[in-house]
Each structure stands twice: as structure tokens, then as C-alpha cells.
Image (cartoon, coloured by chain):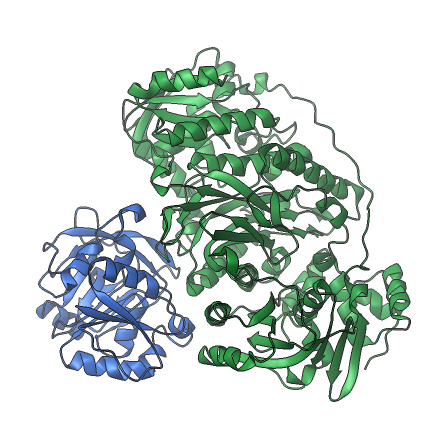
């Protein structure tokens, strides 16, 4: 398995995700945003951070960068794309995933461990997890509040596209366990075809015992 | 250009004597640009004119120190060819005027100080102090400062891993924002600001120069009054995205052999950076101001030289390396301009529109800058106050809860959850512990760091207070298993022209010196912030100390949460029952009289090394230093961090118990010991003549003081976590 991590100006979790990918046996190269060619890859990762400072709208300028044309072609072929945090924002801005990510309901940046429920484990990104299991992964964002029209939400549900949902420690999807106000406690979704995955939690921050947990590694293991 | 006269000099914050000195040094009346430059270099913030002679008395060396004060940041050896570079700096005045941008640019500035030296920044810490929570501006300032610190650090992708947030009415009109940064580098890849090589090109990189922050350093050297709001235009605006690009571009260029010297444009911008580089190299510097990348049209030489626009760097390149360097900066989309060269004139020479607009002998700005030995008084240790009759009837449970739910001692996760403290995936001890610990990237060792000061102690007796601040950082580093290496200090005081304030400063330096010497724990960098006054009322003396320690093996890292039930709880160190200035007396009972606890540096060192040994030999399960609120609060915090309960026993009258449980005697630690290790620990304590009190044991879920209180850990947590949430509800 070969992965390409796209580095936008302002990306800051690029190195972190590379470490995790390689730790779980995925050969990884870094690809600069201004490049026009994507190296041969099975997986493209859009990392967390503040691409272009997130100055216009989070992920918006990045979605127009040169390399994103290549990423679109890659995804149209059905190859895998995973966007974490800012990467998820880039994916919705590029319309590779439906919906939008707006400001957290408390209008503050939130960095903490949260528990999420794996609603769909039949994806390429979650195959090593158990359905409805609860995993603990940190979030760190200011704009992670997933929003979409009713029709889109219905479609997501009908097609089993909701992959991760914020929940309490026992797996109950409650308002209290929703850190940012996302509709249906959505923390991660896939596209209809199932090859593009966006998630707000950072699995690369929960893939090392010393950092307090290994739950994030399930995602990297699923990819392999 | 406007004619320079005495009146204009005064407006620039210079005194009559200083203006006369300029005329003497120049041999003529300065022009407006030159006057602006003198005022920027000679203000307190840049010249340290009141503090310099005292700062020189601090110890700055031990076997780890590679670079002490005098550079952008200090450097210590971390073994294996690795170094750690760190510094703390204040951004108090700007943060009061414009909290978000003031705090954000404080973080940006300290980051630049560290990566200018060739280091990749790996951790941010901060110490922020606000006025009374009831003061009309506090909520606005708290929210602005916290968002500003987060806004900058989160975006640039450097974790904010520790710090302190406190409130006291003495900061009502003058909050404190002290930001610290730590970076890592290779020992043979450290960069300095000393310029060399006549004819080498002087290069400007980073953001464009605008009209923001003009005279920021002068503003930071004046007291506040009712018109302070009008100083908003002197506050700079931060752009963390550009700083991230600047960081990556600088680190990329530093891999090549092109840079002779590099200096960030901080306070007094282009003025201080160019003068500092040339002055250290005993050279001259010639700059054509028409070549400066400007953000706005028609900027004058005066504005260009005094702007404090952020995210800019000045460097001297080796001749012939310009192309290679330009390519890197252009890749990152940053300005790159060759603006002049080094000369042997020993002068700062500026050209604008083909005219010479400034010619100042460089040594007149630095070496000949004013240096004052201001009058000061010495503070005696205040008389001990007997509180027996006040505490006789105090209820222990009620007092504990009052402390835990007090704004200064409540859980601060509301603050640090707004900071990305995990990015870079090396934060192995998160905020909330005694020190933060960062894994040295890719290695088995760690960097421990903490920031501490107890201003109420410093106010009560400045010398003891400053000693205590140094000792508390030392203790916090010991508690996580690290070896304390060195400190950085941020000295926040009032107006030094008053002998009472100067006395606080001098006594603090003296206390700091004694503590640093005994603990072999030198000062390697820092910053002085004076004139922290509003309408003539000064803040408490606040010498914030940032301590850094080396954790040789990250697998030996210690934490403060209890690990198991049925373990022994013991106090290391002597408890004599000192109550004045404690959380109980000062914050709960509101009595602000009396001395702070006394510091015994020998005990401090002995007890610290003892605890350090216990951790190394894996004889303890948890360690927490005893600070605010005394033993009872320390045990409660260990319970809350683990959801494990504790049962402790204290004998004597209610007065005796309260003294034992709530006193803030120094040099103490609480440790958790498994039963099988107890005898070993006792034996070592005995041989080393360490006082150790067995006070109880851990148990499930309930925190208990025999015969006095019984409360679930869950309830303790609820009390401890409520204040920030309630305060910021609306």
C-alpha cells in the first residue's frame, strides 16, 4: 500500500499522519500543493492544519490548489482519499463529500479526547473496527460542526454513509456527547461510492501508547 | 521632515538628560528619523536601562548551558548532539489594549525568537493573569487572550502544553500575558545574531512592512491611564499563517550554508534588529529604505524604521548565496529583498529617495544607552501572624470545597482545551500535571517544562516570593521525573522610578540569584516588563519563571494521579503550619497580611533529589508537589486526576489539623507508595535524613479525612470543574 500526504501551505499534521501511516506499514510520500502530478498512490491523505491560514473559509483555498485536480481524478477512479480535520474541510469544499463544516456551536476551538461510535465498519477505512464499537480519539478544531440539508442527511443515512458519530462512553448518541453541534453527532462520513472518507477526529493522535491510546490505529490498520 | 526639538524628544518618551546625551553623542541635533530610532532603542523595553545592572548579577552558567542571556533565546545541551532552546517574553500592555491580537502576537514573537536560532519550536507555554473576575473587563480580556493564544499557536501547529491562569484585583488595569516557547535543534546547527563580513548582503524576509505597531515598544514602556484605549493603533496584528511559512522557509534555508547571522524583527522592528546584528559584530550597516517591501503607499523612513509589523526577519547572507536563498522564500510565497550590506563604518546609515536620512554611530545606541542605578528600598520579612482564633471554628470540608471551587484553584481545562496541546504528537504529559512533558522527537528522552509564580507571596516579601517561584518550577520538574536544567524569567513589575517598586525588583533578583545558585539552575534567557501600572497603582511584583528539565528516559515519566487503591500516601518534607498568604487565608478568608512561607534552599534541594531518586528507582507510583491549598488540596487533586479515593488521618485539635492540612510550607511533595516498597522508601529517607509523614492510604471513590470529612471524588470534581463553565456561560 502506498500513500501520498498532500502538504498545503499551513498544513501542520502532515508529519504526524506520515508517522502513523508508516508505523502501520503504509509507504508514504509527501506531495507539495503546487505539484501537478500525483505519485502512484493507493491512498491520498489530506492532513490536518490550517491550509492557507483558513483565511477565506476553512479548506476553501486549498480545494482550488493545483494538486487537487489530480486528487479528484484519483478519487474518480475509485481510489482511496482520506481527509482528517482540515482535510475533511477541504473535501467538503471540493465537493468530494456532501455538506459543510461550520463553526463549533460554542464558537471556541476545542482540543480534547472524545468518544465516537463506529456506525459503519464496512468501509475501507474502518474494516478493522467492530460495528457500533466506541473508540476514543482526540479532536482539535474550530469548525467541525457538520451541517447539511435534510435531504442530504437522509441520503447519508439511507446509504450508510455516516461512519463515525460522537457518543458517550457507553455508545449513546446524546446531545451532551456532541462537542461541536454536528447534525446527528456526525464525526466522519464517506461518499456514496465509499472511497472518500472525511473525519474530524485525529486518528494519528491516538496511535501511540505514550500519547494515551491506540484506538486511532484501527483506522490505519483498516487501510492496509 | 519635522524639526526636532526638546518638546518632540519628550513626546518620544525621552528625558531631558537623554535628549542632551543624544546631541552630545551625535555632535549635532538629530533629525526626526534619528530621534525615533534613539527613542526606540533607549526605551525601557529595548534598553533594560533600569534593570541591566541587576540582571547581570544572576547566575547564567552550568555545564548544560551553551548560550545564556544576550541572544534571541538561551540554549542548553540535551545530549546526543541535541540542544533545547527556550525563552519567555511578556506582551502585557498590548494584550490589555487589544486582547486577541496582543496575546496572539506575543506567541508569534516568542516563536520567532526561538526559530531564529535554528530551532524547530515544539512547545508553547504561557502565564496569564487577569483582574478580579468581577471587574467589568475581565471576562472580555480572558476570552480575548485565550482565543488569541490559541488562534496563533493552533494555526502554526505548535502545541500549547502548559501554563497558568490566575485572577487578582491587582491586575484590574494591567493584565499579564507572558508567553514561553521551547524549540529543538542540532548542537552544530544553532544560529546567532552576530553579523560578520563587510560587504555581505543584508536581506529582509517575511511579511511586508505596514503602519502597525509604530512605537509599540515605547508604549510598552509607559504607564497606563484613562487614555490607554487610544493606543490601539500601536498594537500589532498577527498572521500565524505567514509565520508558519516563514518558519518552514527559515528552517529550510538553515539546512544550507548560506546564513551568516539572523535576527527577528521584534520590538522596534527593523531598527533594533539591524542595530543588534551590526553592534554585536562591531560593524556598520547600510540600508536603502526604498527596497523595503511595504504594505502601504507613501510610508516615510520614520514609519518604516519604527513599524512593528509581525512575521519579519532580517538576515545577513554569505555573498553569492542570494539566489539559493531567494528560491526558498519564493517557494513559500514570502517577500525576499536585499536591502543593504554590512559596512566597516560602524554606523547605521539609511538612504531614502537617494538622500541620506540617518547616520548614527551604532555604539551610541547600544553601549552608550542610558543605564540607571535607581533608588530602591529593601523589604524585611513581615512579622508572623497568629491565625489560631480565626481558624479554630473552621470547617475542614467547607474550606476544602471553597478552595477547589475558587477561580484560582479550579480546573483550568476550559482554558487549555482551547489550545491544541497535542499537535506534533509528542505531548506525553498534557496540561493539568505538575509539568508538561514533550517527547524529544524520535528519541527516548523528554523535555519537561513548567511556568510558575505566586504573586501574593512576592507582594508580601519579594525576595522569598522570587525564590519560591524558582523553587516551585524546580519541584514541578522533579515531580514528573525530570532533572531541572535551567530557567527563563519574565520579570513583571511597576514603575521602577519609584523606590518601592525598584526595591521589589532588586529583592526579587536577589532571591532568584540565591535559589538559582543553590539549585545549580541558571537563567539562560528572559525579559523585563516594567511600568505595569494604571493611574499610579502597580501590579504585584510578578517574576514569572519558566523551568525546563531533561527526562532522560520517557518510560520513567511520573504523573500525579493515584495508580491504585490500598497504596500508602506520604508527605515528603517538613510541615510547620505556615498559614499566612495561603489559599485558605488569602483567598478564602480574605486576609492579605503576613509573610509568605519561608524558603529553605538546602531542604528544597535535599527533598527534591530524594524524590528524584525514588522515581528513578521506581519506588513511587505517583508524585505531586504540595503548593496552593496545602496537603489536603494536593491529595484531592491526585484523587480527581485518577478517580481513586483517599483516606488520611491527622491528629490534634482543629487548629492543629487545619495547620497541617492547609499550610503552604515549601519543599514538600506528596507521594503514593505501594505497600511492598514502603520499607525501602523509609530506609532511604532515614539515611538521607528526610522527613517523611505517612498520612493515609488510597481507597476507592471516596476522599476522606478521618473524623472530619467524607466526600465522593465525583463530587470533588463537580466542585472543581464548575467555576470556569459558570463564569463563561453567557
Provide the letter of the chain coloured green: B
**Residue B620 in the image: above or below residue B216:** above
The residue depicted at 16 percent of the width and 64 percent of the height is A223
Instruction: Tell me if residue B725 can be seen.
Output: no
Q: Quadrant of residue B512?
A: top right
The residue depicted at 60 percent of the width and 71 percent of the height is B315
The residue depicted at 39 percent of the width and 52 percent of the height is B417
Q: Quadrant of residue B682?
A: top left
Q: Is residue A99 left or right of residue B656?
A: left
Residue B675 image offset from top left, x and y in percent: 30, 19
The residue depicted at 38 percent of the width and 54 percent of the height is B441
Instruction: Tell me if residue A164 can be seen.
Output: yes
Q: Quadrant of residue B49?
A: bottom right
Q: What is chain A's hue in the picture?
A: blue
Return the residue nearer the eye: A179 or B291: B291
Q: Is residue B544 left or right of residue B674?
A: right
Residue lying farthest top? Answer: B652
Residue B401 image offset from top left, x and y in percent: 42, 31
Residue B81 image offset from top left, x and y in percent: 47, 52
Residue lying farthest bottom? Answer: B354
**Residue A129 in the image: above or below residue B676:** below
Give the quadrant of the C terminus of chain A. bottom left
Q: Is residue B131 left or right of residue B352?
A: left
Return the residue nearer the eye: B592 or B76: B76
Return the residue nearer the eye: A142 or B567: B567
Give the quadrant of the N terminus of chain A. bottom left
Q: Is residue B256 left or right of residue A129?
A: right
For the image shown, how many numbered marks are present on the structure? Answer: 0
**Residue B400 in the image: above or below residue B392:** below
Residue B494 image offset from top left, x and y in percent: 71, 48
Amino acid at each position: 500500500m502506498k500513500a501520498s500526504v498532500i502538504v498545503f501551505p499551513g498544513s501542520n499534521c502532515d508529519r504526524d499522519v506520515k508517522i502513523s501511516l508508516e508505523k502501520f506499514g503504509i509507504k508514504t510520500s509527501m506531495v507539495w500543493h503546487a505539484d501537478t502530478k500525483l505519485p502512484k498512490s493507493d491512498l491520498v491523505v489530506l492532513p490536518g492544519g490550517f491550509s492557507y491560514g483558513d483565511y477565506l473559509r476553512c479548506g476553501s483555498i486549498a480545494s482550488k490548489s493545483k494538486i487537487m485536480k489530480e486528487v479528484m481524478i484519483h478519487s474518480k477512479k475509485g481510489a482511496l482519499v482520506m481527509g482528517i480535520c482540515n482535510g475533511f474541510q477541504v473535501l467538503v469544499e471540493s465537493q468530494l463529500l456532501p455538506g459543510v463544516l461550520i463553526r463549533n456551536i460554542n464558537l471556541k476551538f476545542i482540543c480534547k479526547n472524545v468518544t465516537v461510535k463506529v456506525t459503519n465498519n464496512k468501509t475501507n477505512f474502518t474494516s478493522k473496527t467492530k460495528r457500533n464499537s466506541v473508540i476514543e480519539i482526540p479532536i482539535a478544531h474550530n469548525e467541525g460542526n457538520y451541517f447539511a440539508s435534510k435531504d442530504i442527511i437522509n441520503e447519508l443515512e439511507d446509504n450508510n454513509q455516516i461512519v463515525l458519530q460522537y457518543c458517550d462512553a457507553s455508545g449513546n448518541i446524546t446531545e451532551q456527547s456532541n462537542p461541536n453541534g454536528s447534525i446527528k453527532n456526525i464525526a466522519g462520513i464517506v461518499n456514496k461510492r465509499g472511497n472518500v472518507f472525511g473525519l474530524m477526529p485525529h486518528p494519528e493522535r491516538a496511535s501511540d501508547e505514550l500519547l494515551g491510546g491506540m484506538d486511532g490505529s484501527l483506522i490505519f490498520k483498516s487501510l492496509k | 521632515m519635522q524639526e526636532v526639538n526638546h518638546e518632540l524628544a519628550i513626546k518620544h518618551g525621552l528625558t531631558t538628560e537623554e535628549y542632551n546625551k543624544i546631541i552630545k553623542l551625535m555632535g549635532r541635533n538629530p533629525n526626526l528619523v534619528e530621534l525615533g530610532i534613539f527613542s526606540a532603542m533607549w526605551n525601557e523595553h529595548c534598553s533594560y536601562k533600569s534593570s541591566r545592572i541587576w540582571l547581570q548579577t544572576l547566575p547564567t552558567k552550568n555545564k548544560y548551558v551553551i548560550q545564556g542571556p544576550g541572544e534571541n533565546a538561551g540554549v542548553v545541551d540535551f545530549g546526543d548532539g541535541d540542544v533545547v532552546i527556550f525563552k519567555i517574553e511578556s506582551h502585557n500592555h498590548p494584550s490589555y489594549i487589544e486582547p486577541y491580537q496582543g496575546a496572539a502576537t506575543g506567541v508569534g514573537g516568542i516563536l520567532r525568537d526561538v526559530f531564529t536560532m535554528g530551532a524547530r519550536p515544539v512547545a508553547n507555554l504561557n502565564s496569564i493573569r487577569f483582574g478580579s473576575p468581577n471587574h467589568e473587563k475581565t471576562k472580555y480580556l480572558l476570552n480575548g487572550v485565550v482565543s488569541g493564544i490559541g488562534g496563533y499557536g493552533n494555526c502554526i501547529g505548535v502545541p500549547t502544553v502548559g501554563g497558568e491562569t490566575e485572577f487578582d484585583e491587582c491586575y484590574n488595569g494591567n493584565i499579564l500575558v507572558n508567553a514561553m516557547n521551547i524549540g529543538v535543534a542540532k548542537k552544530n546547527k544553532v544560529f546567532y545574531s552576530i553579523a560578520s563580513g563587510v560587504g555581505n548582503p543584508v536581506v529582509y524576509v517575511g511579511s511586508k512592512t505596514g503602519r502597525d505597531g509604530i512605537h509599540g515598544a515605547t508604549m510598552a514602556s509607559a504607564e497606563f491611564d484613562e487614555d490607554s484605549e487610544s493606543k490601539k493603533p500601536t498594537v500589532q496584528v498577527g498572521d500565524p499563517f505567514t509565520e508558519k511559512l516563514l518558519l518552514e522557509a527559515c528552517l529550510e534555508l538553515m539546512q544550507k550554508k548560506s546564513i551568516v547571522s539572523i535576527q527577528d524583527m521584534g520590538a522596534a522592528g527593523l531598527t533594533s534588529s539591524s542595530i543588534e546584528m551590526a553592534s554585536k559584530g562591531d560593524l556598520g550597516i547600510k540600508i536603502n529604505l526604498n527596497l523595503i517591501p511595504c504594505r502601504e503607499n507613501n510610508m516615510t523612513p520614520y514609519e518604516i524604521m519604527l513599524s512593528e509589523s509581525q512575521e519579519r526577519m532580517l538576515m545577513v547572507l554569505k555573498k553569492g548565496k542570494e539566489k539559493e536563498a531567494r528560491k526558498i522564500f519564493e517557494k513559500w510565497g514570502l517577500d525576499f529583498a536585499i536591502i543593504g550590506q554590512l559596512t566597516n563604518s560602524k554606523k547605521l546609515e539609511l538612504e531614502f529617495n537617494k538622500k541620506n536620512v540617518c547616520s548614527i554611530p551604532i555604539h551610541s545606541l547600544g553601549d552608550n544607552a542610558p543605564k540607571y542605578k535607581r533608588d530602591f528600598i529593601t523589604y524585611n520579612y513581615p512579622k508572623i501572624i497568629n491565625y489560631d482564633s480565626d481558624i479554630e471554628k473552621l470547617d475542614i470540608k467547607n474550606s476544602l470545597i471553597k478552595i477547589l471551587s475558587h477561580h484560582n484553584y479550579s480546573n483550568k481545562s476550559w482554558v487549555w482545551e482551547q489550545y491544541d496541546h497535542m499537535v506534533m504528537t509528542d505531548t506525553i504529559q498534557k496540561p493539568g500535571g505538575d509539568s508538561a512533558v514533550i517527547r524529544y522527537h524520535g528519541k527516548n528522552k523528554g523535555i519537561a517544562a513548567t511556568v510558575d509564580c505566586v504573586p501574593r507571596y512576592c507582594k508580601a516579601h519579594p525576595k522569598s516570593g522570587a525564590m519560591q517561584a524558582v523553587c516551585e518550577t524546580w519541584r514541578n520538574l522533579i515531580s514528573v521525573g525530570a532533572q531541572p536544567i535551567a530557567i527563563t524569567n519574565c520579570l513583571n513589575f511597576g514603575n521602577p522610578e519609584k523606590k518601592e517598586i525598584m526595591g521589589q525588583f532588586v529583592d526579587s533578583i536577589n532571591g532568584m540569584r540565591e535559589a538559582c545558585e543553590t539549585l545549580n539552575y541558571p537563567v539562560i534567557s528572559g525579559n523585563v516588563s516594567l511600568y505595569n501600572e494604571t493611574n499610579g497603582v502597580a501590579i504585584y511584583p510578578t517574576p514569572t519563571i519558566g523551568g525546563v528539565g531533561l527526562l532522560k528516559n520517557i518510560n520513567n515519566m511520573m504523573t500525579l494521579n493515584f495508580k491504585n487503591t490500598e497504596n500508602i500516601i506520604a508527605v515528603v518534607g517538613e510541615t510547620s503550619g505556615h498559614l499566612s498568604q495561603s489559599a485558605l487565608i488569602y483567598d478564602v478568608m480574605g486576609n492579605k497580611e503576613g509573610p509568605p512561607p519561608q524558603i529553605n534552599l538546602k531542604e528544597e534541594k535535599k527533598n527534591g533529589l530524594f524524590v528524584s531518586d525514588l522515581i528513578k528507582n521506581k519506588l513511587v507510583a505517583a508524585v505531586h508537589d504540595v503548593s496552593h491549598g496545602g496537603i489536603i488540596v494536593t491529595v484531592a487533586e491526585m484523587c480527581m486526576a485518577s478517580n481513586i479515593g483517599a483516606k488520611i488521618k491527622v491528629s490534634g485539635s482543629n487548629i492543629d489539623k487545619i495547620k497541617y492540612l492547609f499550610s503552604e510550607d515549601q519543599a514538600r511533595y506528596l507521594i503514593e507508595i505501594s505497600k511492598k516498597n514502603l520499607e525501602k522508601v523509609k530506609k532511604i529517607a532515614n539515611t538521607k535524613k528526610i522527613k517523611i509523614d505517612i498520612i493515609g492510604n488510597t481507597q476507592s471513590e471516596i476522599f476522606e479525612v478521618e473524623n472530619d470529612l467524607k466526600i465522593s471524588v465525583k463530587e470533588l470534581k463537580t466542585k472543581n470543574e464548575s467555576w470556569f463553565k459558570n463564569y463563561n456561560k453567557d
